[in-house]
Amino acid sequence: MGALTNIGAGVVALWIFVALAAPVLAPFDPNALLSPFATPGAPGPDDGTFWLGTDHLGRDILSRIIWGARSVLTYAPVAAFCAYVLGVTMGLAAGYFKGWVDAGLSFVSNAVLAFPVLVLYILVITTIGASALNIVLAVTFASAPGIMRIVRSLVLDLRNRGYVAAAETRGEALWWILFVEILPNARGPLIVDACLRLGYVIITIGVLGFLGLGLPPPDPDWGGMINESRALTLAFPHMTLFPCLAISSLVLGLNLMADGLRKGEVRS
Amino acid sequence: MTPVLDIQNLSVSYRAPGRVVSAVTDFSLSIAPGERVGLVGESGCGKSSIAMAIMRYLGRNGLVSHGAINYQGQDMAALASEALRQVRGGGIAMVYQDPMAALNPTMTIGAQLIETRLAHGAVSKIQACDDAMAGLADVQLSDTTAIMARYPHQLSGGQLQRVVIAMALLPRPNLLLLDEPTTALDATVEESVVDLIGEISSKYRTALLFISHDLGLVESVCDRVCVMYAGQAVEVGTGVSVFTQPRHPYTDALLQCRPDPLSTGTAPREIPGVISGSHEYGRGCRFAPRCTYFEVGVCDTPDMALSARTNSTSSHMVRCVKQNWTRPTEEIPLFEHIPSQVDKSSSRLMLQVNQLSKTYRDTSLVGFGGARDVVALDGVNLTVHKGEIVAVVGESGSGKSTLAKILMGLELTEDGAVLFEAVDVGALRARNRPRSIRRALQMVFQNPDDTLNPSLRVGTQLRRAIKVLLPDLRRSEVAMRATELLDSVRLSAHVANMWPNELSGGQKQRVAIARAFAGAPDIIVADEPLSALDVSVSAAITLLLKSMQRDHGASLLLISHDLAAVRYLADTVVVLYGGKVMERGPAPAVLASPRHPYTQMLMGACKVDVPKLEPQNANVVVEAGTGCPFVSRCPERIGGLCENTPPPIICLGEEQHEIACHLEAVNRSR
């Protein structure tokens, strides 16, 4: 593991800690309307300080970022996990059964992949409405095909191994062959992919928030914070800058971790 | 005369995290122009490291820690990059194990050959093209124009290796390094490639360094042989001298591992113990822990140099202080070859295969190069009696693996029946077969590296197999049986707690055999269980298969191209070619006096005095059912008859020895 991997893991761990300890760490109520347009470092009520300033409604930006970490680190992993459940199941079925099962699943996934992903999100969310559940659904729907293709290609190779044939000849049930004999041996590339994909999902949630399709206000959401303040960026850059830095640092941390894991994967 | 290559006191080591692993220690070898030297040893003995060190291809973690390599008097280590490039490929050429990996799949053979020629020597493109064609003709490929225009995937393995050899020879190198050049090839192809290497070396006076684990091959090609063990040369001398009068116990033991496939009754003998890792080398002889003649105070003295063999005028050198050992004459072989002597009339018929056929249809929607169905099996009949060992022999593509898959329910029959104790299971996948049949019919797979699930501990896998096949056992009984099985394949109980990647190839194959015997099976199907193993390990596994089969009273269907193992193990031999049975009969009769031209050819691949055949037209596919599948390669083909009429099955004498060949029928009618 290189230094960069450790830095990446450190950044991710820090954000997880922030999300967990949000009630303790946040100096103010994230939705309280305190003093609009305060610059970073300006004094706040009760001897407090607006370390990162406030937004146009007077909400403390630091507190909103801290609480926003909580929501992004809840919905992004849940969405990625759902995408994995669907994608892995589809990939296992396509790679193991081949034939028409593979042809059908591959066709569906190619059709989804061929659609511009942003248009897809907008279509899904505007049709079924913006809510946390719908964000998870949209991300699952859009990410599962990519995961399926990775799993399918791994399974096509793994299903020809001797230990799979041995399990078949002793009459193991299908679930045992798929989830005990095949899937654990595909875990290396999948863990790397999961790290990267989690980063993309965080970006996606940010983009959806920016487009006004994210979590319904007033709860803090990084993408939503950028969206709300974008008109004032030139006059009050701090309102946009800090949520942007939050998203970038978390995604960069995940990418560095994925890089390190991939190198470890190649070496072993 | 300056030697082409002079290696002096070479030591190679690799840096691993936290330690340095020594791969080669104090290795010296000198090769004269035109001389052919064989480097023999099992995997891990350092022979490939020597080749890599010569070419300066050692990776970032490898280093020549001591010694020098001189090519025609110049120190290889001192060469600058351009001079090194000229020597690599130009002066010293290398041929690797896998020809497919050595050629660029996106370029035609011709383009690659011409590129090689142009890279070494200022010649015109036309000249390079002519040289390339001449090179292909040199390696006895017919129709060179057509081959020049083909891509690597359009040629067979044997043809590819010939192309690679032609390519290596194009710049007329002084030395050709061959690293296991025939390991990936079929036995019959292997022999013709080896002969070719010998012929070419004499034609152009190219010196050879032939690296192989196969003693027989080295013996047939090389003038001088160097046997390696654990990074050291243990015996060096002329081929005749080393192979007929081995003076190092390791050489002797290696030779004992491979009995002559034609002599009767000799068992292969295993070498006890395993090669120790470099950190375990003690003082003195590195073979000492496994040596029969080990003597305290003599063999563990630190100074163990190569010394001339006593009472010898030739340059036969041995690294052994006790080189005057004599093999105990009264030694009892570990196992004697006692054929199972199954009386077929009284013994129970376990498995009967009737008119089994299987065709793989080309189902791709876009058929590149034309969709073509491949006939894997065509009307195969086979019986296995209780306690009998049946060997199915044939080259790759003969349908032997398909046969195994159908028996095991991994593939389905298309036509014909697989009767297991009178129940037809040919159309049932393993999952759909009754558990009693799954328990009774188990398999040992070819590749030890993928026979065990790397994510589960050895013990977990064994216990799972027992639990699934014998569901009535209680938990404690399952655990006990797992320990017993490990013991019966001579592995200690702590192996159960190990992960598969902590085991050697031989140990993995032992676990796989234990797993196959988990449910006390009646028939074991073993698909090439020895082909991926080292010589000494293969001997040990052969003996183990035999003893397990005997102790458990199981029948064994052995699929193999290793005729030495077949000779030792089998009661009955079935020879398969192109999905059809060519010859079948009792093992001694078939192997000692093969009657079918194909069997004769297979036997010829391991014995020199039978006329050799060129498998030039191996790609000619005979339509199923129209004639003998072997017709394109048969030296005794009867024109007009063999191509069109399926050969009759003729019984030879009373021994249930039969062949499918027109020749016999025509001879008889005369």
Image (cartoon, rainbow, N blue to C red):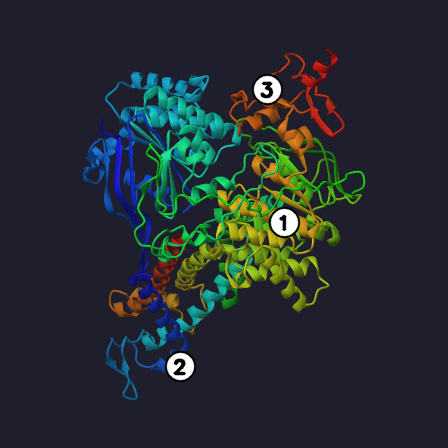
Considering every residue shown, the one lying at the far top of the view is B670
Q: Distance between the residues labelled 1 and 2?
A: 70 Å
Could you say which is closer to the camera, residue B266 or residue B646?
Answer: B266
Above or below, A191 relative to B66 = below
- Residues packed near mark 1 inside 10 Å, few (<14), some (14 to 19) or many (20 plus): some
- Residue under the image location 66 percent in, 53 percent down: A170
Q: Can residue A126 be seen in this view?
A: no
Q: Position of residue B252 (x, y in %)?
A: 46, 41
Tell me whether marks 1 and 2 sit on the same chain: no
Res A3 quadrant in image = bottom left
At mark 3, the secondary structure is: loop
Dot 3 amino acid type: Cys
Give the quarter of the figure containing the C terminus of chain B.
top right
- Chain containing mark 1: B
Tell me whether marks 3 and 1 sit on the same chain: yes
A236 sits left or right of B182 in the view = left
Give the number of marks: 3
Q: Where is residue B74 in the image (x, y as percent from the top left)?
A: 19, 34
- What residue is shown with label 3? B634
Dot 1 amino acid type: Ser
Q: Position of residue B377 (x, y in %)?
A: 66, 32
At mark 1, the secondary structure is: helix
Q: How far apart are marks 2 and 3 (CA)?
A: 85 Å
- What residue is shown with label 2? A23
Q: Distance between the residues labelled 3 and 1?
A: 38 Å
- What residue is shown with label 1? B547
Q: Can residue B11 be seen in this view?
A: yes
- Residue under the image location 71 percent in, 62 percent down: B471
Q: Where is residue B87 in the image (x, y as percent from the top left)?
A: 25, 32
- Chain containing mark 2: A
Q: Earlier in the sequence, mark 3 or mark 1?
A: 1
At mark 2, the secondary structure is: helix
